[in-house]
Image (tube, rainbow, N blue to C red):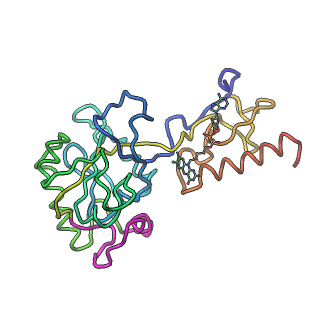
Amino acid sequence: MGQAIGAATANLDTNWGLPSFIGEPFDPSAPAIYNMVWGDWGIYRAGAGSIIVNKKGKRFANEASAYAVFNRAFGNYATEEPGFANIPAVFICDNDYATSGLLPGQKAPQDPAPDNFFVANSLAEIAEHFGIDAAGLEAEVAALNANAVQGSDPVFHRGEKHVDRAIGAYRPYKTELANPVLAPIATPPFYASLYVPGTCGTNGGLKTDEKAKVLNTKGEPIPNLYAVGNCMASITGGQYCGAGMTVGAGAVFSWIAVRDALGIA
Ligand SMILES: Cc1cc2nc3c(=O)[nH]c(=O)nc-3n(C[C@H](O)[C@H](O)[C@H](O)COP(=O)(O)OP(=O)(O)OC[C@H]3O[C@@H](n4cnc5c(N)ncnc54)[C@H](O)[C@@H]3O)c2cc1C
């Protein structure tokens, strides 16, 4: 409606990213609301004893990074075989992980594994079930396991930043680990679920000035039209600076817009 009266837009290709567990079968054409099982703010992804891999069995990001940051790694396009290289991905954890905290959707650790999880005694079965390259997965888990004992992650640096460890602290910390968000994935059974990009909102929309007045494509305010919240193009240009970025900016610009509309300086 804004565009119909000449409003400019910005950030339409970005969103407030939230990686999510999803049920099977993976159907990108189905409305997302029916597909989505559980958004992962990092509570699960950053837990020691878990890994996220693509169809080649390869990790593609630091699993302990913030949700909007990890979500961007799904966007890597495969140049050798057309398509998104990391969609859908697969989350895998071992029994130590599963019994030391909750899986998404569980209310207590003794609850049955959630419906979207496939449980198997070997990584090979997980690879077969999800169509992952089995040798690639075995090699990636072996590398992660060897490095986890040292507490290091030479490729993605999981657990090196304070923010990684803060995200991982949502699960019970294992104090014996050299790196609190990194542990070998070694104890069967293994639990696995499809894992895909998700969102907790759009951050593109109508372009505004500092008073939340909507601008036209020449940069001039359109009289009596304001935009706030997620229908306003975010002042961060698509970056999620931290929790509260969306509600915080929405509240502040609502306050500014109402004051401006009432003529209060
Ligand atoms: C699970 C989850 C957790 C989140 N956690 C956080 C957090 O911790 N911190 C944070 O800052 N943000 C968080 N967010 C994001 C935040 O909730 C949203 O960005 C924010 O609520 C958007 O506010 P809004 O007013 O722009 O839009 P909304 O809250 O979506 O409001 C839009 C309203 O417009 C109504 N509407 C739609 N169409 C019409 C129509 N045609 N006519 C009339 N009314 C209409 C809708 O019913 C709705 O009430 C979270 C989001 C989700 C999904």
Q: In this view, does 63 lie to the left or right of 223?
A: left
Q: Where is residue 129 in the image (x, y as percent from the top left)?
A: 17, 42
Question: 33 above or below 127?
Answer: above
Which residue lies at the image location 67% right of the left edge and 20% below the top edge? Answer: 4
Taking the magenta stretch, the answer to whether it contains residue 239 is no
What segment carries the magenta color?
A: 160-184
Expressed as whole percent of the image width and height from the top left, the position of residue 102 reads 35, 60
Query: Residue 97: x and y, percent?
Result: 28, 63
Residue shown at the point (32%, 31%) measured from the top left: 27
- Which residue shows up at 31% across the image and 67% down it? 100
Q: Quadrant of residue 204?
A: top right
| Majority SS type along the magenta span | loop
Which residue reaches farthest bottom?
176
Q: Nearer the viewer, residue 163 or 110?
A: 110
| 195 left or right of 58 in image | right
Q: Which residue occupies the extreme top position in the image? A: 4
